[in-house]
Image: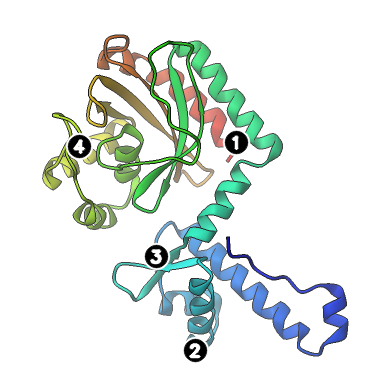
């Protein structure tokens, strides 16, 4: 994975360019922090104004960060969003040490309560990324490893993330998605998916009614940060023979309680 090179104290003493390098590093980190915090792509003009930097300097920083994978061009080619290297760094930070163990414990306690497999996911570009999961001790179960990606349009977590986006951004993303029919129940019409997202935004949870895998039901709830932004999702899934949609909905309060605990661990 590409990495940022930080100047050492020895290097600073040895060269006269170290202060400039340090300043450049600080500007790069400030730019990355700004893009990550916004939750959307920012134009060069926005970045320049927010960072109080000349457009030429901002453009140069963006080009360097894009080359390293830290930033990525948005679909309009005039804006910059989070790149794959920055996403990888965020995932590594989330999975680090004690905090990861505490998050896993929240999931384990939830599985003991609801009796089915639960997972923690986040939005990664135009897909859902699995951050953690705890399996229920049943012989029939779906196994998706940490780091796996699943589609947005047909999973409980994916539709939840779509519903959390501003309407204009959501519509634009749905317009770019390949709405592949994975089962007989998959929503493949953009209008139907938009209507589903509006319903999810109103009620605060999302369902997968055998839309991703035939015979599998799921429910997902949001994990919000201190600014009330959706940063992750907690979901439960199980075969429809064991967990009907009604049974899944009955588990929503337990998932929401776990999500409230998880919010302090993001």
Is the C-beta separation of discs 1 and 3 under 8 Å? no
Q: Is residue 34 above or below residue 202?
A: below
Q: Tell me the distance, in whole angstroms, between the alpha carbons under discs 1 and 3.
A: 26 Å
Residue at the image position 23 percent from the left and 58 percent from the top: 172
Dot 2 or dot 3, earlier in sequence: 3
Q: Secondary structure at mark 1?
A: loop
Is the C-beta separation of discs 3 and 4 under 8 Å? no
Q: Tell me the distance, in whole angstroms, between the alpha carbons under discs 4 and 2.
A: 43 Å
Is the C-beta separation of discs 4 and 1 under 8 Å? no
Instruction: Report the disc number at residue 196.
Output: 4
Instruction: Report the disc number at residue 41.
Output: 3
Side (left or right) of 192 relative to 258: left
Q: Tell me the distance, in whole angstroms, between the alpha carbons under discs 3 and 4.
A: 25 Å
Q: Mark 2 against mark 1, which lies toward the viewer? A: 2
Side (left or right) of 11 relative to 84: right
Q: Tell me the distance, in whole angstroms, between the alpha carbons under discs 2 and 3.
A: 19 Å
Q: Quadrant of the N terminus?
A: bottom right
> Which residue position holds label 2?
56
Q: Is residue 126 above or below residue 14?
A: above
Dot 4 or dot 1, earlier in sequence: 4
> Which residue position holds label 1?
264
């Amino acid at each position: 994975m590409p990495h940022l090179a930080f100047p050492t104290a020895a290097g600073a003493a040895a060269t006269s360019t170290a202060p400039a390098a340090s300043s450049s590093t600080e500007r790069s980190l400030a730019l990355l922090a700004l893009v990550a915090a916004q939750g959307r792509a920012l134009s060069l003009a926005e970045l320049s104004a927010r960072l109080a930097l000349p457009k030429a300097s901002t453009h140069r920083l963006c080009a360097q960060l894009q080359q390293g994978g830290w930033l990525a061009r948005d679909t309009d080619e005039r804006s910059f969003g989070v790149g794959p290297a920055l996403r990888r760094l965020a995932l590594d930070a989330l999975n680090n040490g004690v905090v990861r163990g505490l998050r896993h414990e929240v999931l384990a306690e939830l599985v003991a309560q609801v009796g089915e497999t639960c997972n923690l996911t986040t939005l990664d570009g135009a897909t859902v990324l699995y951050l953690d999961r705890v399996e229920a001790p049943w012989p029939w179960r779906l196994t998706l490893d940490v780091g796996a990606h699943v589609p947005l349009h047909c999973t409980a977590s994916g539709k939840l993330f779509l519903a959390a986006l501003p309407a204009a951004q959501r519509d634009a993303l749905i317009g770019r998605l390949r709405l592949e029919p994975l089962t007989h129940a998959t929503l493949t019409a953009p209008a139907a998916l938009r209507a589903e997202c509006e319903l999810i935004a109103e009620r605060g949870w999302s369902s997968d009614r055998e839309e991703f895998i035939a015979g599998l039901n799921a429910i997902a709830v949001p994990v919000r940060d201190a600014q009330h932004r959706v940063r992750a999702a907690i979901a439960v899934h199980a075969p429809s023979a064991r967990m009907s949609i009604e049974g899944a909905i009955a588990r929503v309060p337990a998932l929401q309680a776990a999500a409230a605990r998880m919010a302090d661990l993001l």
